[in-house]
Image: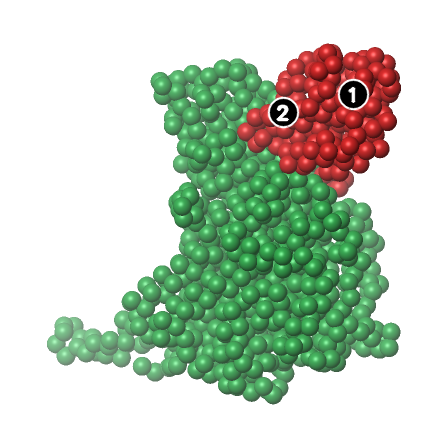
Chain colours: A red, B green
Amino acid sequence: MKFDDETTDVLIGGYMSKDAAQQDYEAALKCGGYLHGAVVVSKDLNGELSVEQTDHMVREGAAGLGAVGFAVGLFAPPLLAATAVGAAIGAGAGKLLHRRTASKLEQQAGETIPIGGAGLILAYPHSAAAKVEPAVTRAIKKAVGEAEGHHVQALKGAIADAQQKMAESGT
Amino acid sequence: MSEPDRTRLPIRRPRFQGVANRTLHGSVPDWDLIGHAEPPAGAPNVLLVLIDDAGFGNPATFGGPIATPNYTRMAEGGLKYNRFHVTALCSPTRAALLTGRNSHTVGVGSVGEFAGGFPGYSATLPRDCAPLPRILRDNGYSTAAFGKWHLTPDGQQGPAGPLDRWPTGWGFDYFYGFLGGGASQWDPCLAENQKIIGTEPTYYDRENPYYLPDAMADKTIEWLHGVRAQDAHKPFFVYFSTGCSHAPHHVAKAWADKYKGKFDQGWDRLREETFARQKALGVIPADAELTGRNEAFPAWDDVPEHLKPFYARQMEVYAGYSENADYNVGRVIDAVDELGELDNTLIIWIWGDNGASMEGTITGSFNELTMQNGIPLTDEMQLQLSERYGGIEAWGGELMDPHYSAAWAWAGNTPFQWGKQVGSHLGGTRNPMVIHWPGRVTGAGGLRSQFTHVTDVAPTILDVTGIPVPSSVDGVDQEPMHGVTFAGTLTDPAAPERHTQQYFETIGNRAMYKDGWWLAMRTPRIPWVITPEALKPYAPGVWDPDADPAELYYLPDDYSQAHDLAAEHPDKVAELKELFWAEAERYQVLPLLATLSTFFGMLPPLPEEARFEFRGDVQNVLSGMIPRIYNHSYAISADLVVPAGGAEGVIVAEADHLGGFSLFVDGGKLTHTYSMMGVFVYRQQAGEPLPAGEVNVRMEFAADEAKPATGGEVTLFINDRPVGKGRMDHTVPVRFSGYAGMDIGRDNGGVVDRGYEDRKPFPFTGTVKKVVFDVKPHLASEDEQQLHAAAHRGHAAHALAE
């Protein structure tokens, strides 16, 4: 299935542990819904990144999900109940929205994944949403964006939409 | 020698009964002069054991799910008490236990760290209330305390003291333990006598790592052997106060794994099982009823399936941790037995000081300090954070500081309602007690049901040792002890009940007991919720305590407080309300809610110090005594000498990876790591190496705004030149750690940055001459005042969770 045949959805999820992101990543791969691509990135307590991806788009000659953009973040809870602090995702996604031209996955993820955190991106045709989205059960925070158009443009648009939604949900 | 006057302490030196002439000719020595105070003939040894943050329904001896073979051994050879009462908070129970007075009278209406501005809450022992260890010591006992103390104000836990607020100042010859309310069992920051000794060197032994409960037993046995090596007869008083079962719940995996699957049925079913065992054992009356679940606790059936293993593991670890405490107390008892002195040793073993603790909130936490810093995390977040630090199988290991769910605590308090902090109900105020003393107790294995209270323990010990409560100590007239002896119950199951009236008060939750009747007045606040919204109804001028819901129970007929009789006996309610106010005034309980006064604007003076200097050999500065950098812009500056070949290591580090900061040199580069309670971790590094020679390095944090947990920008400097920067979106608003210390030139105990874990304590290989903290005031004084208020509210919140 080419991913410019219909609306493209992108789900981004933020996690506080690699284990949780990996579980959702694997659940998405097994969910039975078609995936254009899936990327899971985590940063350990030493700051070392690890990346795992299944990227059909690469095989199709597209730029690839990982190369297009990446942003995840963590839910940031209120502190002392009276003080709402900005979500890490807000800052990370905000930066990327201003320069969402392609850059290397590692560089972007390195900037946006907090130490100890992890993120997941899933890209899929809208028709697969009913199978893919329920597979993502452990994200602390997630958002789904969508866009139409030719592959890379659609992907960029959907990622930007998801990032925007993630940022807007803020704290 | 004639019997000395023991009512005035210290015991006066004996009058010289010999003859002292100008020369030895005709002189007659009096050898009694070089003796020391002797206890009354036949005075037994005393071993007083206090388990922490545990409930009536925890130990198997009282029907609980936790194996406690040594507790049962003592009960079978001694007596079980099933109507023994404590205050509903750590420090107050300890103060009452060790003084025989009501906790508010001795200034400990709240916890030790938190000294307030009212007499009942000063955390300062009055000189007219000499404590039990002092009395015993002055009467010829060897005295020692091991483990948790929690009776020294936060700012007085360093070498400047005042040291009369330390255990040795209370009359203990020897102390080995920790001064605060809780400690890591793996890397506690310890005190020995009058010195903070930090983390023991064996912490670094990976083959045989340090574990506080083991060390407490080892030290106790070593001390007993030392005393006996010197004096075969001098009686001892040992206060063995475990850090267990207070958070962090730390125990080796093998102990927790003994309970694999034992709690999969959940807290609701566990309560029913415990209740059935309690009935079968006869430790509760046959007609006792199991109280219901308050809606504050979720039903186990409502817990999502994928989270049930997470919750179950919390309780498995708690159970293993608690069983280990039983094991180590057993080792001490065995040592006494080996000395041949078990028959002549009065063992009083109290399983819990305030009921089980609900401070883990409903979710439980991978890091107990997250709650105290006001970081509400969902159970899914808690699970993921535990995965970050090793997963639920590592719950109990040294990478987490875990606390279980409040619902497990509630189950641990079976058959009662509520738990710790709730002084109005038995879940927070009734704990098991076992007494073992073959030399005196008759009817071994028996049950005693007289109403007894923690203030009764000291008078009972004095009673059986033949030592009077002194009327004067150091020339100060003494307040009589408020408790009464229950020594009569040791030999007579039908001994009359002597403690017939007792008030209870903890954070506004209060009760009045008299002749079987119990008036319960709980502030309708969920105990673990201290948000401004939750506290609004209790503001001065708003709260009318007499309007709080009143419940009335008649305990002789209603062991568990299952039937509220308030509507049927309004006169009794009114009588007990009035009696409570009278008792509250008499014992310095007033003003109610003084513990929370800072939440309502009653603050100590704004601190003036903003600059703090530490020389290079300062270590183990306890967490409550570090510079108050929270919520402010600040700078940490260090004068270093870097050898020609370069240097690496820690310049200054506070606490560990679950909350703390470290300024260090790694790979030749100045680095700063900041852990926001293990939830967020930030790291900044210089872009160039550190030069050799005399070097000044500096880390500056520029806060975004004057508010708790403010984010801000970090800049690193070498010799005043910026060399690196970064951002920290969230900072710690209240306190990095409940127990870990700050060190200059190294990072003792658990480390802040896991990157140098394999090199810990990662000492600086150059010279740290001086480290200076400069805490910047905010421009607007009202901002400063607001943050001062927030800091003290947080301080109170921390204290309440200890």
- The image's mark for residue A51 is 2
In this image, B487 relative to B46: left or right? Answer: right
Q: Earlier in the sequence, mark 2 or mark 1?
A: 2
Up-down relation of residue B98 to residue B496 (above or below): above
Up-down relation of residue B703 to residue B284 (above or below): above
- Residue A120: horizontal and vertical position, in percent? 71, 28
Residue type at mark 2: give it. Answer: Val
- Which secondary structure, mark 2? strand
Q: Residue at left 73%, top 38%?
A: A138
Residue type at mark 1: give it. Answer: Ile
Up-down relation of residue B76 to residue B183 (above or below): below
- The image's mark for residue B742 is none
Of all chains, the one bearing label 1 is A
- Residue B211: horizontal and vertical position, in percent? 46, 52
- The image's mark for residue A159 is 1
Of all chains, the one bearing label 2 is A
- Residue B687: horizontal and vertical position, in percent? 53, 16
